[in-house]
Amino acid sequence: MPEGPSVKKFQLLCSPFVGQVVSRVGGSTRQINPDDLKTLTLWDTQVHGKNLFLAFGTKEELMPSQDSIPLDLSEHRSASQRLAMPGSSSFLQGLKENEAEICSPQCYQQEELASWLASDMDNNNGHTWKWLRFHFGLFGSIRADEFARANKANKKGDWKDPIPRLVLHFDAGGFLVFYNCRIQQCSSPTTEPATDILSLEFDRERALEVLAKDIPVCYVLLNQSYFSGIGNVIKNEALYLARIHPLSLGSSLESSDLKSLLDHAVQFSLAWLHNKLQRQRLQLQIYMKDKCPKGHEVRKATFGPPDGLKRLTWWCPQCQPRVPPEEMDMPLAQGT
């Protein structure tokens, strides 16, 4: 399932289409009626964790005049400022100047303007917008101005291109294509930026309090109520980079260890987003590896709370020392 950095990239692909009218629709979805979007304008894009929200409205919901736009929206803010969240300053400072600007200031200005419009929706002449929530499956994706093509034959030996769930053509000539996603209509975005690992409003102190509980940290990191956007890749990589065993109880760790774990989760997420926007591969340290970067054999097992989702976890017994045996009495599937 796409994690926070991937969904953030999807949002940035959609942002240039804000203000454009949907001229044609297509796709195989039966969760909504695509025809309902025809002649509507894409007014806003928002992302929260692993969910993307798009808002559509009528053409009568005109853009505000320049005089009504808040002054701070007319000022340029670089991507390094936009992404300078707690725990990430050392990461961004280590980048070259041109690498830190992973997206143009104009792109973020447009996104910020759309968010301001959304906050002012209740005063927009009484009009209401149609919000759609997109949740992506294991291989969900969005493409702009191109369709996905088959890169291998299916089980029947056929080379069939993936079937889009939704295709939106815009009056300016471009189009967006959505694959392998669930689409639901909602009254408004259900977002809580304080829990979103890639949000400027991410609540670091609250996150540290949750991590410090008497629960294995590998369980807590995947709790979307507190760490929205973190998935199995980020979990595994952050634990390895912080040199913490996945089943370590947060209450048994030093505060410096918890801070290190949180810093690495944020920094890795930012690095992943940066590489995605630069179309570069991110070098993984432990996830799906047989050996760690130091050459040690890696172990693998399925961990998860008794009443929750169990996920495969990779760790290095030497780089991530095992916690005391009494703390290892947690339900887990057979490992290798």
Image (cartoon, grey):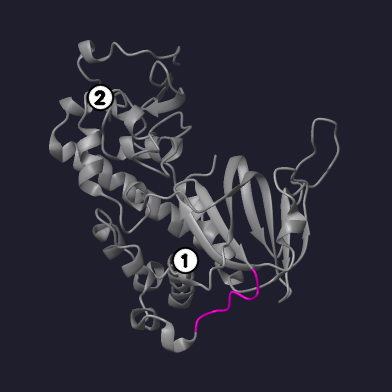
Q: Nearer the viewer, residue 187 or 72?
A: 187
Magenta region, residue range = 58-64
Name the foreground residue: 315 vs 139: 139
**Disc 2 marks which residue?**
248
Q: CA–CA distance between discs 2 and 1?
A: 47 Å
Residue flagged by tag 2: what amino acid is it? Answer: Ser
Q: Are marks 2 and 1 in contact (CB under 8 Å)?
A: no
Q: Residue furthest front?
A: 126
Give the amino acid at mark 1: Asp
Quadrant hosting residue 265: top left
Q: Quadrant of the C terminus?
A: top left
Residue 249: numbered disc: none
Q: Can see residue 279?
A: no
Q: Secondary structure at mark 2?
A: loop
Tell me if mark 1 has few (under 14), some (14-19) or many (20+) residues whose alpha carbon lies within 10 angstroms of its own.
few
Image coordinates for residue 145, horizontal then vertical, percent: 70, 65
Secondary structure type for disc 1: helix
Between 47 and 296, which is closer to the camera in this rendering?
47
* Viewport quadrant of the N terminus: top right
Residue 323: tell me if it is visible: yes
Marks 2 and 1, the one that precedes in the sequence = 1
Residue 171 point in image, percent of width and height: 73, 74
Q: Is residue 59 magenta?
A: yes
Q: Is residue 317 magenta?
A: no
Please state if 35 lies on the left or on the right of 329 as rendered: right
Horizontal and vertical percent position of residue 49: 44, 47
Q: Does residue 237 sit above or below 194 in this rendering?
A: above
The tag on residue 122 is 1
Neighbours of disc 2 within 10 Å: few (<14), some (14-19), many (20+): many
Q: Position of residue 222 (x, y in %)?
A: 39, 34
Quadrant of residue 228 within the rendered picture: top left
